[in-house]
Amino acid sequence: MAERKKVLNEVKFWTPLRLASTAIVLGLLAAFGVSSCNSNDPPPKNATTSNRPTARVNRGLVTLPRQVLDAENKAASGAAPIKLADYSGKVMVINLWATWCGPCRLETPELVRLHKEYQSRGVEMIALSTEDPDASAQTVMAFMKEYEVNYQVGWAKREVAQILMQGRTAIPQSIVVGRDGRIVNHFVGFDPNSTPAKLKAALDEALKT
């Protein structure tokens, strides 16, 4: 009889709401423990994790090639397509990300703060999701609202993402480009303890040229 009461109490404890809340908490814990995600779709099943948050520097492209600059990437605002060539002569931060990626969610508030700090100095921030633009339209808009994203957001064309990533499919990736078109730094992954300061240093360096 006592054993039966124990089982009944356990069943009552694990209500649908508690189960959902537990799943959310576990998901957040997992997100805080990773440095990057795999950009391949469908991401929730293929995301790669790491126990140590890190951000690596990708030494690949020196400048942005014409096919990347001239590509028309769909804009989340529904306005004209995003062409990186339109920002030539300005310091840019190109961020490759996805709504489902835990480290991307950690990085976004830092990017929002950086944009607020540097936009008056002519820095342009462009976030290009690696997700399918049709399937993720609503989630991207909801993401922008949730994180109060105040910079240009859209979707990277597949060939644009491939060229920029240079074989590394991990996200987020943040590429700082100087006024002269030279890539000042290219960060792969996100470390909350070091990446924000490194991004600021890269922006300060880019603004000097």
Image (spheres, rainbow, N blue to C red):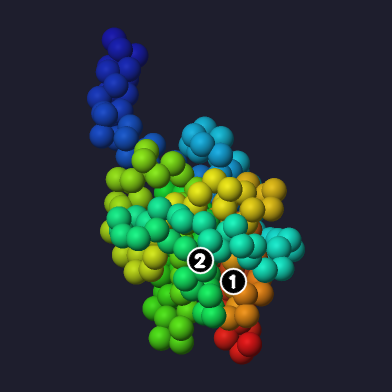
Q: Residue at x 32, y 39 (%)?
A: 21
Q: Residue at x 58, y 48 (%)?
A: 159
First along the sequence among labels 1 and 2 = 2
Can you say whether 192 is above or below 23 in the image?
below
Disc 1 marks which amino acid?
Val
Checking the image for residue 84, the label placed there is 2
Exactly how many numbered labels are in the figure?
2
Q: Locate residue 56 relative to residue 113 in the image: left or right.
A: right
Element marked by disc 2: helix
Q: Is residue 53 visible?
A: no
Distance of label 1 from label 2 (alpha carbons): 13 Å
User: Residue 196, how many percent across, how many down?
Assistant: 55, 72
Instruction: Return the residue nearer the eye: 93 or 198.
Output: 93
Disc 2 marks which amino acid?
Leu
Checking the image for residue 196, the label placed there is none
Can you say whether 33 is above or below 120 in the image?
above
Q: Residues within 10 Å of mark 2 (few under 14, many from 20)?
A: some
Q: Which quarter shows the C terminus?
A: bottom right
Residue at the spot of label 1: 176
The quarter of the picture where residue 15 lies is top left
User: Residue 87, how many percent across, how many down?
Assistant: 49, 73
